[in-house]
């Protein structure tokens, strides 16, 4: 597609209907945001030329002229999606495909293909945007387990239709068992897809890794309504983390190096985090209220001797005991 022609189509799509109007300056900004290289005089020529072919006009303001579709203009259908929309489709396909049910993906496939073609042929700098952005995890790279497509489809179908499933599931280090589950949500954690569901037998909401299902049978039985359950609240309470006994939250006090303090100043442990320099010392004291989880312990261990746990005393004792065990292990092997 000719990029100048497509730019003019986008210009038309940005014009409001009378009595609203948009200035050439605002149009210029919007077109540049879509990746077009254009100056104000070129835009003015485009608008004047388009006004000869379409029912658009300017209000005649000499200082800041406004453009709009005439009040009685016939509706003009522009089937081409805008470039930002095309980019959204491409990024969604790249990063969010796991979140879509198969039926939705099949429905979106023509849009994904059209968006890619549109971006490639637009002449816009947005065409290469998806190659200029990426997400990376600093966790140890691991190959995620494969999920059987029939399991994935059945889980999404149950979630969409709000119907119960009968399943065989193999928990960690346990034998497979039969479950009746009412699906509540799908959550992806570090490339692993979890089904959040109510276990009908225990009447508790639990998380089930999709790759551990041996089978899922869809039923037509509606799930039990639970107006009090909210997936966002459920996640904010730390339910997809690994809780470490009780209490759920602890007041953490650490002595950290200058480098660790720098990073914690950028990415805080909690909203109530406080970092205080130690007088006549290069270290800092950090206090924060955090969830008492295994993830907290893994994070603390990743900093090795750059962080010392001061409080709570129980957590300090855990690390002291772990250090002794590690010393024994490595002392024996040398």
Image (cartoon, rainbow, N blue to C red):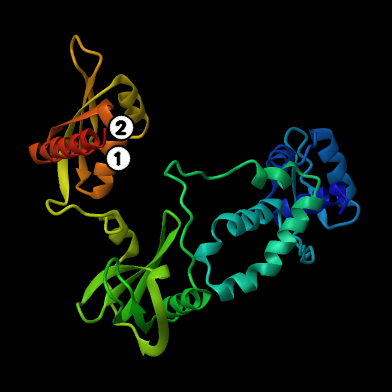
| Residue 248 spot, x, y in % from top left | 16, 51
| Residue 50 spot, x, y in % from top left | 87, 51
Residue located beneath label 2 in the image: 303
Q: Is the C-beta separation of discs 2 and 1 under 8 Å? A: yes
* Quadrant of the rendered image containing residue 79: bottom right
* Quadrant of the rendered image containing residue 318: top left
* Quadrant of the rendered image containing residue 108: bottom right
- In the rendered image, is residue 134 in sight? yes
- In the rendered image, is residue 228 in sight? no
Q: Among all residues in the image, which is located at the extreme top?
A: 280
Query: Where 237 falls versus 305 (above or below)?
Result: below
Q: Nearer the viewer, residue 174 or 308?
A: 174
Q: Among all residues in the image, which is located at the extreme left?
A: 313
Residue at 70% across / 54% down in the picture? Answer: 16
- Report, in whole angstroms, how far the alpha carbon at label 2 lies from the one at label 1: 7 Å
Residue located beneath label 1 in the image: 299
| Residue 185 spot, x, y in % from top left | 38, 69
Query: Where 184 falls versus 277 (above or below)?
Result: below
Q: Within 10 angstroms of label 2, few (less than 14), some, or many (20 or more) residues?
A: few
- Residue 38: which numbered mark, if any? none
Query: Where 245 falls versus 171 (above or below)?
Result: above
Quadrant of the rendering where the N terminus is positioned: bottom right
In this picture, residue 255 sits left or right of residue 113: left
Q: Within 10 angstroms of label 1, few (less than 14), some, or many (20 or more) residues?
A: few
Label 1, secondary structure: give it.
helix
């Amino acid at each position: 597609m000719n990029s100048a022609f497509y730019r003019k189509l986008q210009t038309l799509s940005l014009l409001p209907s009378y009595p609203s109007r948009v200035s050439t300056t605002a149009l210029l900004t919007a077109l540049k945001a879509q990746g077009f290289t254009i100056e104000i005089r070129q835009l003015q020529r485009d608008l004047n030329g388009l006004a000869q072919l379409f029912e658009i006009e300017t209000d005649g303001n000499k200082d800041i002229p406004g453009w709009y579709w005439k009040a009685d203009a016939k509706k003009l259908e522009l089937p081409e999606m805008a470039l930002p929309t095309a980019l959204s489709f491409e990024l969604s396909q790249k990063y969010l495909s796991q979140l879509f049910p198969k039926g939705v993906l099949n429905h979106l496939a023509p849009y994904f293909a059209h968006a890619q073609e549109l971006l490639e042929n637009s002449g816009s700098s947005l065409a290469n945007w998806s190659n200029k952005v990426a997400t990376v995890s600093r966790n140890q790279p691991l190959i995620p387990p494969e999920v059987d497509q029939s399991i994935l489809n059945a889980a999404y179908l149950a979630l969409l239709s709000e119907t119960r499933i009968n399943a065989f599931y193999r928990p960690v280090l346990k034998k497979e068992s039969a479950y009746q589950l009412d699906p509540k949500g799908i959550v992806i954690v570090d490339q692993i897809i979890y089904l959040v569901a109510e276990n009908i037998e225990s009447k508790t909401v639990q998380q089930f890794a999709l790759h551990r299902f041996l089978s899922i049978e869809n039923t037509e039985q509606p799930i039990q309504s639970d107006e009090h359950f909210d997936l966002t609240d459920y996640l904010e309470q730390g339910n997809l983390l690994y809780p470490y006994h009780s209490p759920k939250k602890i007041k953490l006090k650490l002595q950290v190096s200058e480098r660790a303090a720098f990073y914690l100043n950028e990415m805080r442990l909690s909203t109530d985090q406080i970092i205080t320099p130690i007088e006549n010392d290069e270290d800092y004291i950090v206090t924060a209220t955090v969830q008492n989880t295994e993830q907290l312990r893994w994070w603390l261990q990743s900093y090795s001797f750059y962080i010392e746990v001061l409080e709570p005393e129980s957590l300090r004792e855990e690390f002291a005991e772990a250090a002794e065990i590690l010393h024994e292990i490595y002392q024996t092997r040398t």
